[in-house]
Amino acid sequence: MHPNAILDACADLVREALAFDHPADAVAARFFRAHRGLGPRERATLTDTLFAVLRRKLQYEHFAPSGAGPRERRLAILGFGGPRDFLFAALSPQEKEWLQRCEAVAPADLLDRHRHNLPEWLAQPLRAQLGDGFWPLADSLLGPAPLDLRVNLLGAKRAEVQQELQAAGVEAQPTPHSPWGLRVQGKPALNRVDAFTRGAVEVQDEGSQLLALLLDARRGEMVTDFCAGAGGKTLAIGATMRNTGRLYAFDTSAHRLEALKPRLGRSGLSNVHPVVIAHERDERIKRLAGKMGRVLVDAPCSGTGTLRRHPDLKWRQSQQAVDALAVTQLAVLQSAARLLKPGGRLVYATCSLLAQENEDIAAAFAAAQPTFTPVPVAAELDRLKLAASADLCAGPAGQFLRLWPHRHATDGFFAAVWQRRG
């Protein structure tokens, strides 16, 4: 396509996404279905442009009024994800000169909000939590996330899969902490790689892998993934159980659980039982009370730990939404806790960066549930022989798992662990 046509398409996609009626990836998918003439390279350019605009929205909106033409075109020029010479072929002399002036502005000359590109409801608590660590985090959230794979140990070994991927032209290195993980270079077409299509690997962030590892599900146990979603952690847990026992995948969304089915088919697991529930007090949950050896609660959350992958979340969420989520999180955790038998393990996790959804929920649960004893995560990770486990933890005696994009190159994750007393 002509450079100007690509730039116009980028502007149209940006316009649709900035309505924030739907998640950005869903908006892009709908746009591509309506424009089937776009090839893989053009779709990649449009997607990269959109995500650049979403990541640096405040900065680009600060620059945009000094230019001319439609606002969305100016934003698309600032965030254009294709080659520089291709972009310049689409620009007028005035647009080229304006873009060069914008790019000449030093970050130090910008206001803080135009540097960190976070809404104030999110920037303020993160500053309070991190102090001097705020800017490294903010900078990390302006870039893309790595692509991590989890090797399905049910029928594969990491070293062998790594060699197989390399032979297929996919460069991958072992993740630094998860014993199941491989970090891939670039953006390979995994759906054309045999290791992926036969279920030897699944896409899963290293931090998410560590949550499944921390649950430490055993052979023959009854286990629940309480908020299973599309089942990434469910599949990892099922593999650790060696396809034995019974693993319930609960979720309130039939659509999300439906997305688990093809992944289940590739995985070779037969011990997973997806169950759609109406809410956390569903009768099916009551019938299983006191029977589970392990329960993972990956609670619905703001998703702020995934902003490198989903930068639109920071504009689609609000403090009011986080307040409402915190109420839900505690209710879900307390309901899920009823499933555990004496001696059972409960893991509460989120992909949020905010203490309100993490440490505050753990403290509220501990105060209300005296029969649950906290299990220090640092000691558990040591027992599981994870490298540099202390660096993954926070709180007194390494009480919690705390993963940060700028420190660990993972999504932001939190986890707290308890054991139910008899």
Image (cartoon, grey):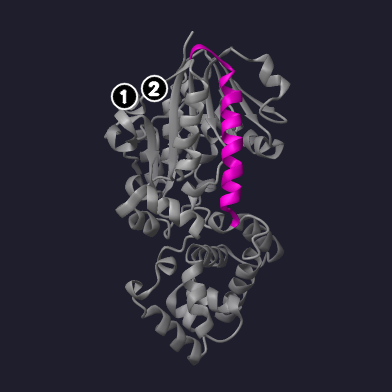
Q: Secondary structure at mark 2?
A: loop
Q: Is residue 253 magenta?
A: no
Q: Which residues are magenta?
A: 316-344
On screen, residue 122 above or below 257: below
Q: Is residue 222 above or below residue 112?
A: above
Which disc is residue 379 wearing? 1
Instruction: Please state the horizontal and vertical placement of residue 15, each as a whole percent of the image.
Output: 64, 70
Q: x and y percent of residue 351 in the render?
A: 49, 42
Q: Amino acid at mark 1?
A: Ala
In this rendering, the answer to whether 76 lies above or below 293 is below
Question: Viewer-nearest of labels 2 and 1?
Answer: 2
Residue of label 2: 375
Q: Main secondary structure of the magenta part?
A: helix
Q: Residues within 10 Å of mark 1 (few under 14, many from 20)?
A: some
As rendered, which of 52 and 10 lies closer to the eye?
A: 52
**Residue occupying image coordinates x 34% and y 58%:** 135
Give the x, y percent position of residue 106. Answer: 33, 76
Q: Are marks 2 and 1 in contact (CB under 8 Å)?
A: yes
